[in-house]
């Protein structure tokens, strides 16, 4: 699920604050009518939304949209500091799995790590200071600063998602090469690496141009062809077992489909 925010219209900043918890306290259990953005400066804080738990550490941003249930997970550490922003709800704002037009909406994960990026912290603090000062045209400036903040969070969120997806793909390929006797299903890979099933499908197609199962077969066939050239005494039974095929008949059928020759025909050609 992602948070989708309308960026075409001016948005009101309804409140900001620089918080400091000296003693451990839990997050309140509540449903708010405004969007709540939290940047953790120091300490830690466990906060949940709709039953999903998020452990906040310094430089994490937590986005809690209006209408969703927020609840306590773990108390703050002593001397926990944070900045928060409350914003109005605009037409089209929502929390869902739907895809939205990038020219009109910015879509963000609920928790975003901003470690290594200076802009989000500075923008949170600038918005807080500007809202207290209430200089001339401060409402316009606050709305503009908040749009910039959303853009910065989107850039970081996109970069982080790309890194996570690439790491997943590399680790999945490594696992497959280390376990050639297995065929991994999409659901199984998603559970092992804690990613969504669509992510598994999309990453394999993006990097290989093939579905997950087809990629595994292709790689197995390439390995088998190499072994046939270097180890001519291998039997079809041995190869089918070592590369995860049901039996020799299934292996032979798949091999011919991809190579154009049966295993026996292929061996006779390369000898």
Image (spheres, rainbow, N blue to C red):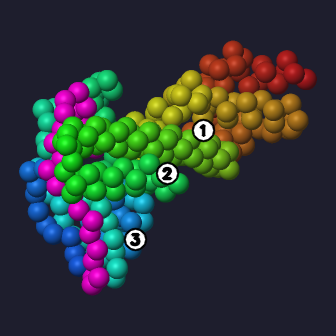
Furthest residue to the right? 271
SS category of the residue bearing label 2: loop
Q: Nearer the viewer, residue 63 or 251?
A: 63
Distance between mark 2 and mark 3 Cα atoms: 16 Å
Q: Which residue ends up furthest to the front in the rendered image?
A: 136
Residue topped by disc 1:
245
Work out whether mark 2 precedes mark 1 in sequence or the reverse, and give the earlier one.
2
> Hey, which quadrant is residue 84 in on the image?
bottom left
Give the answer, above or below, for where 221 lies relative to 136. Answer: above
Q: Secondary structure at mark 1?
A: loop
* Mark-to-mark CA distance, 2 and 1: 48 Å
Residue 95, given in percent of the width and then of the height, sits at: 21, 42
The circle on residue 52 is none
For the residue carrying disc 3, how many other residues have a C-alpha within 10 Å: few (<14), some (14-19), or many (20+)? some
Could you tell me which residue is drawn at 82 percent across and 24 percent down? 267
Residue drawn at point x = 39 percent, y = 44 percent = 153
State the separation of the CA atoms marked 1 and 3.
54 Å
Residue 121 location (% of width, % of height) = 40, 55
Find disc 3 in the rendering and name its residue. Answer: 42
Q: Earlier in the sequence, mark 1 or mark 3?
A: 3
Examine the structure image and report whether residue 43 is included in the region drawn in magenta: no
Quadrant (top left/top right/bottom left/bottom right) for the C terminus: top right
The picture places residue 248, in percent across and down from the top left corner, at: 64, 34
Which residue in the protein does label 2 denote? 117
* Boundaries of the magenta span: 1-24
Mark 2 vs mark 1: give the one in front: 2
Q: Nearer the viewer, residue 186 or 267?
A: 186
Compared with residue 221, is residue 234 higher up or lower down, i.e. above or below? below
Left or right? Give the position of 133 relative to 115. Answer: left
Q: Residues within 10 Å of mark 1 (few under 14, many from 20)?
A: many
Observer-nearest residue: 136 or 247?
A: 136
Is residue 15 located in the magenta-colored stretch of the structure? Answer: yes
């Amino acid at each position: 699920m992602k948070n989708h925010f309308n960026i075409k219209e001016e948005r009101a900043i309804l409140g900001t604050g620089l918080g400091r918890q000296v003693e451990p306290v839990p997050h309140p259990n509540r449903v708010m009518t405004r969007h709540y953005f939290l940047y953790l400066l120091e300490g830690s804080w466990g906060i949940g939304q709709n039953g999903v738990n998020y452990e906040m550490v310094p430089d994490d941003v937590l986005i809690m949209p209006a209408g969703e249930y927020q609840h306590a997970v773990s108390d703050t550490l002593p001397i926990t500091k944070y900045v928060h922003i409350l914003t109005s709800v605009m037409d089209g704002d929502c929390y869902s799995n739907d895809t939205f037009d990038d020219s009109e909406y910015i879509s963000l994960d609920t928790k975003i790590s901003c470690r290594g990026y200076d802009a989000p912290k500075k923008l949170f603090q600038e918005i807080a200071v500007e809202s207290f000062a209430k200089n001339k045209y401060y409402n316009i400036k606050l709305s503009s600063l908040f749009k910039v903040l959303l853009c910065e969070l989107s850039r970081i969120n996109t970069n982080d998602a790309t890194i996570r997806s690439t790491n997943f793909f590399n680790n999945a390929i490594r696992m497959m090469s280390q376990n050639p006797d297995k065929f991994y299903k999409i659901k199984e890979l998603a559970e092992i690496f804690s990613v969504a099933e669509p992510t598994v499908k999309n990453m394999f197609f993006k990097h290989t141009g093939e579905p997950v199962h087809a990629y595994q077969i292709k790689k197995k066939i390439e390995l088998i062809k190499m072994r046939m050239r270097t180890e001519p005494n291998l039997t079809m039974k041995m190869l089918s077992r070592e590369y995860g095929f049901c039996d020799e008949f299934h292996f032979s059928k798949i091999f011919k489909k991809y190579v154009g020759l049966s295993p026996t025909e292929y061996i006779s050609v390369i000898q």
